Image (spheres, helix red, strand yellow):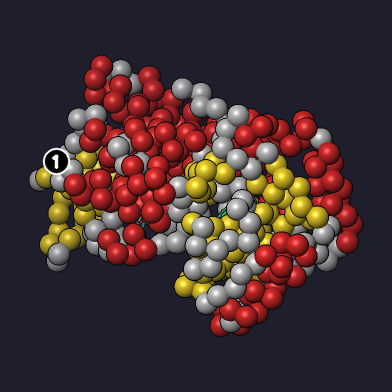
Amino acid sequence: MDRTQVAIIGAGPSGLLLSQLLYLNGIDNIVLERQSREHVAGRIRAGVLEQGTVELLLKAKSGGRMLSERLVHDGVSLAFAGRSVRVDLKALTGSSVSVYGQTEVTKDLIDARTAAGARLMFEAAEVAVAEFDSAHPKVRYRHNGRTHELSCDFIAGCDGYHGVCRQSIPQGALQTFERTYPFGWLGILADVPPASHELIYSNHARGFALCSMRSMTRSRYYVQCALDEKLEAWPDARFWDELRVRLPDEIAAAVITGPSIEKSIAPLRSFVVEPLRFGQLFLVGDAAHIVPPTGAKGLNLAAADVRVLYQALVEYYRTSRTDLLERYSQLALRRAWLAVRFSWWFTSIMHKFSDDPFNHRLQLAELDYLSGSTAALTSLAENYVGLPFEI
Ligand code: APR
Ligand code: PHB
């Protein structure tokens, strides 16, 4: 039977970053990923990194390309009622955010792991985790047509919302908290310069819209859509028209259109499971919690989990102390709930929930208040750039 110290299930940003940080601290690990390398490296996800995430990627020695290619944004704008208000993140908090796609973060981490000779197994099928309530957990999987068994000290469940790890924990041991939203985001990627040099979140009577980017030549735009919307119903021209309608005139006029290179619909969900540890199995990132993309907290929250877990494992292997491992769930959940609250709130003031005009008036009043109150803007800004870490 093969053996490692930490078996990591999933090669999304959580699994890859944890693997790299453990490796740099002399902790042996194996990553088992269901999908192919090309699939993992090609997925289009969000693109805003908190400074804490940037620092963790640098600590993981996989932030070189990010440092040279990222766009540092000192502010974001909120558009509503035909006007737009800039939230000066830097002035309000002293911090900025970095625009750099999660797709690129994933590629950089795969490159760093591969260069270090990592045991990074793509296309690992039928992954099953067992005996994690004992001191000797096991992981079974199929790879290249053969069945393998792995013995380890710990399992890190970095396998996302649909992964096998959370589902392997006895039902009665977990409590789940969930909210689904009655709409999704239709997003497109296009090789056109962005409408503005910063992100714009727009509240409109027809629904939310977001102007984002990956670089000064590649834009990412979203419009709120119905959950049962079909991509075929959204040729590029319809998307661009709907986007412009939902933006203040001046911004709409600055939108440069072009053929889409990717188009997809994503549902919005808030989800948290408690606790994040069962025996020697730890849940990390999307396996543990999901937030709606408004505010771009998903990847940052995953990185924050990894930050606590890798430090806890380093402490354990250096000193045999389990203090931090025992606090993992509590520390990660505290931050997760703060991000769940912020993402839910930001979602709720920016989206169309119903045709009830009272709701829209309330949202406009809240945005009006925000735009005139340094206290309210600071609250938004400090959540957007990322709250301070506890450890
Ligand atoms: N066996 C092996 N791998 C699996 C299994 C399984 N049974 N199930 C899922 N996986 C893999 C998925 O293919 C995926 O590559 O686990 C990985 C999970 O990656 P993500 O879903 O990206 O989750 P995570 O790494 O936690 O990343 C944080 O926060 O909001 C999001 O978009 C953000 O994806 C980002 C996430
Ligand atoms: C993105 O660029 O994909 C993005 C940016 C900000 C968000 C969500 C998504 O809040």
Ligand 1 within 8 Å of the CB at mark 1: no
How many discs mark residues in the rendered view?
1
Q: Residue at x 86, y 62 (%)?
A: 356
Against 268, is 7 above or below?
A: above
Q: Residue at x 57, y 44 (%)?
A: 73
Q: Indicate the position of residue 361 as horizontal and vertical percent values.
A: 88, 55
Q: Indicate the position of residue 358 as horizontal and vertical percent values.
A: 89, 57
Q: Amino acid at mark 1?
A: Arg
Is residue 152 at all visible to an observer of this figure? no
Considering every residue shown, the one lying at the far left of the view is 1
Q: Indicate the position of residue 214 as horizontal and vertical percent values.
A: 49, 57
Against 337, is 356 above or below?
A: below
Q: Residues within 10 Å of mark 1 (few under 14, many from 20)?
A: some
Q: Indicate the position of residue 318 as horizontal and vertical percent values.
A: 24, 20
Q: Is 134 left or right of 171, judged from the image as shown?
A: left
Q: Residue at x 88, y 61 (%)?
A: 357
Q: Is 65 left or right of 102, judged from the image as shown?
A: left
Q: Closest to the observer: 58 or 37?
A: 58
- Location of mark 1 (residue): 3
Against 188, is 368 above or below?
A: above
Q: Closest to the observer: 57 or 2?
A: 57
Q: Closest to the observer: 103 or 283?
A: 103
Where the N terminus falls, by quadrant?
Answer: top left
Q: Residue at x 37, y 39 (%)?
A: 57
Disc 1 is placed on an element classified as: strand
Is residue 365 at all visible to an observer of this figure? yes
Q: Is 94 left or right of 189, judged from the image as shown?
A: right
